[in-house]
Structure formats: C-alpha cells, structure tokens
Image: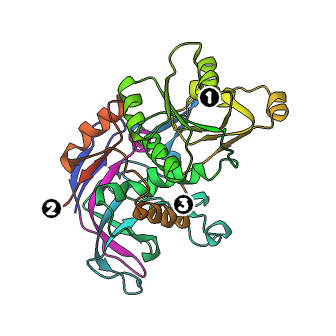
Amino acid sequence: MLSYDVIEHGQPLQARIRETPQPQGAEVLVRVTRSGVCHSDLHIWEGFFDLGGGKRFYVKDRGCVPPFTVGHEPFGIVERLGPQASGVAVGDRRIVYPWIGCGACAVCAEGNDHLCLNTRFLGVIRPGAYATHVLVPDAKYLVDAGGIDEAWAATLACSGLTVHSAIGKLPPLAPRHWVVVLGCGGLGMAAIGMLRARGIDQVVACDVDAAKLERARRQGATAVLDTRGDDAPARLKALTGDAIAGALDFVGMPATAQLGIGALCKGGHYVLCGLFGGELTLPLPPIAQRGISVRGSYVGSLRELHEVVALARSGRLAPSPIELRPAAEVNRSMQELRDGHVMGRIVLDFEGVQG
C-alpha cells in the first residue's frame, strides 16, 4: 500500500510503500478513494496544539509518533473482510467513521466513542486515510452514503458531523434570534449550509477575508461581517439587534472566543469547535448574570453521522465548496490550508492510485 506519512513534524509528508494490512477478527480493509484534508491534520503534522501562555500539548504524548499516517476523512471501497466481519460486502462503497473508541468502556456502550478516554481514532491514534488503504476495527463504523457525491461524503464524518453536533448544542431559538458563525473556512461553510437546512434563517458569518465572506453569503448566510477593527463587537450587535442566541466558533482563538461570548444575548450559548489555540480569561459574575453557556463540542457520535447522511440525502443540505485534487498534491494542500488560502474543503483523490 501507499501512504503519505509524517516522517518529521513540520516537514513535507513522504510517500511510503509498505505491506497492506490484513484484516483480523471483525476488521474491515477499505480501499480509500477519497480523503478529506482537515485543519486538525495540521496540528498533528506540526506535532502540537497551542494551549496558550507558552504551553503546548505534544501529540507524541498520545502515542502519535512518526512515521505516522494522518487523515481522518476517508471514503472508500470495502476490499477485504476479517473472518468475523459482517454487515458489509466486498465492493461496498462507504464513509468511514474515524472517531473510534476502545469499544469496552461505559462511554462507548452509550454510543459516544468520540468521548472515549482510550481512543483508536483513525489518523490520530491509528494509521489514517492519507493512504490507499485504511483498516477499520468493525463494519459498524462504515456508513452507506449512496446517492451523495463521494468527495462531499468523505467530509461528512468530520466537518459535517462536527457542525451538526455543535448546532445540536444550541438553545431553542425564537424567530428573532440570530446564530453567528465565526470563521468561514471548511467548517464555517458547512455550518451555514446546515443551519439553513435545519430551518435557522438568521445566520451571520464572520471572518477577516472578504472573499470568504462573499462565498459565505452565496452559501446562504443572511448577513456577513468583517471582524477586523476594535469596533467589531459593537457592529455585530447592531447588525443582529443584540439577539445572538448562538455563537459557533470554528476558529478557536482568543479573539474569536471573546467576540462570540461578548456578542451573546442573555441565555445564549457559545460553542467552541476550532482548535487554532491560545487561552482565555473570563470574568465569572457576568456568566451567571447573563445566564450564558460556554461549552466545547468535539466531532460527534456515530448516531449523529447517520443523521448527517440522512440530511444530505434529503436534498435540503447545500454542499460545502469542495476541490478534488490528486493525492500526490497532499503537501501543497497542507501548505495552502496552513496559509489560510483554502475556500471550503480539499479532498484528495486516491482512486486509481497504485498501492
């Protein structure tokens, strides 16, 4: 098999030829045809997450030690089954749910693999999808997305799932309420489409890139706001009539967190998904006095992925902007993503790649 691996953190990924794994027990070997490129891959490639105040969390402390294959948005074809595998057949085309837990704890038993403390996440703990093949522990993690464009389908198990789960954490919304989307990259674009698909009409998209704001408007945002300048909080409140009940932060840096939390009306919810990094200091009394909620949201459950696929099949969900590129362009794609030059999502094309 062929994979594009992190050999040294921060250096270009290298193509490697190695033995294709053979599925054992209930495992399923999937021939990858599409693999999404996610901003989280950058952190693993760089080797750390920024915790603010000069502190870092190093991925090696979780067992992610080079050489390592990143990538957690695979779509592919079932190529081989372990002797105990059931529920799929060779030749089936499936999304791979990558947020796999240990399978033995109470959290996993409740269907929340993504919150397990002993994870087996593909592309994070186990070899991922920047490769011609990926080994999946069980067929239950393979989701049929027939009728959906396969490049878009590959992104549903990460960007689609992340925004669906985050939106589900918002409070009940009245007609006067607004939801603000902070960051108009791949997640932000997906969120705008999903908010509109779920009947939320008043959506304001925020970014510092004029081209992304224009694309967000075409994606369905009711209003857009360039957040450069110290008066951004006042302009945001004026634009929405001080009625922002939900703030979805897909950047996750101090500036976006301060803007999102500060813009909430009483009883509003700020939901953090982005992992850009940094730290935040908040005065405590206003959190109680305003009755606001500040919470995190990390990807989502397998049940929620099935909900996302059903929504995509319904025709109500507008696809995010997607560019399909040859797999060999993985390093260019990572660099452009790091530089902020990607509109929507890049998906690598592994169909026909020898390995």
> Measured along the vertical axis of the image, is residue 279 above or below residue 319?
above
**Could you tell me how far apart the alpha carbons at marks 3 and 1 are, in whole angstroms?**
41 Å
Secondary element at image label 1? helix
Q: Mark 1 points at which residue?
A: 240
Q: Could you tell whether 323 is left or right of 270 in the image?
A: left
Nearer-N-terminus badge (3/1): 3
Coordinates of residue 114 in the picture (x, y in percent) = 56, 59
x 26%, y 77%: residue: 91
> Measured along the vertical axis of the image, is residue 192 above or below residue 349?
above
> Measured along the vertical axis of the image, is residue 58 above or below residue 286?
below
Q: Mark 2 points at which residue?
A: 352
Instruction: Locate residue 280: give its quadrant.
Output: top right
Badge 3 local density, few (<14 within 10 Å), some, or many (20+)? Answer: some
Q: Could you tell whether 94 is left or right of 99 in the image?
A: left
Q: Give the range drawn in magenta.
A: 19-45
Q: In which quarter of the image is the N terminus?
A: bottom left
Coordinates of residue 135 in the picture (x, y in percent) = 36, 68
The question of residue 162 being in magenta is answered with no
Nearer-N-terminus badge (2/1): 1
- Callout 2 amino acid: Gly
- Callout 1 amino acid: Thr
Q: Which colour scheme is used?
A: rainbow
Q: Nearer the viewer, residue 185 or 7?
A: 185
Q: Could you tell whether 83 is left or right of 161 in the image?
A: left
Whether the residues at callouts 3 and 2 have beta carbons within 8 Å, the answer is: no
Coordinates of residue 162 in the picture (x, y in percent) = 51, 51
Secondary element at image label 3? loop
Coordinates of residue 311 in the picture (x, y in percent) = 47, 61
Q: Which of the numbered marks, if any, corresponds to residue 119?
A: 3
Camera-side mark, 3 or 2 = 2
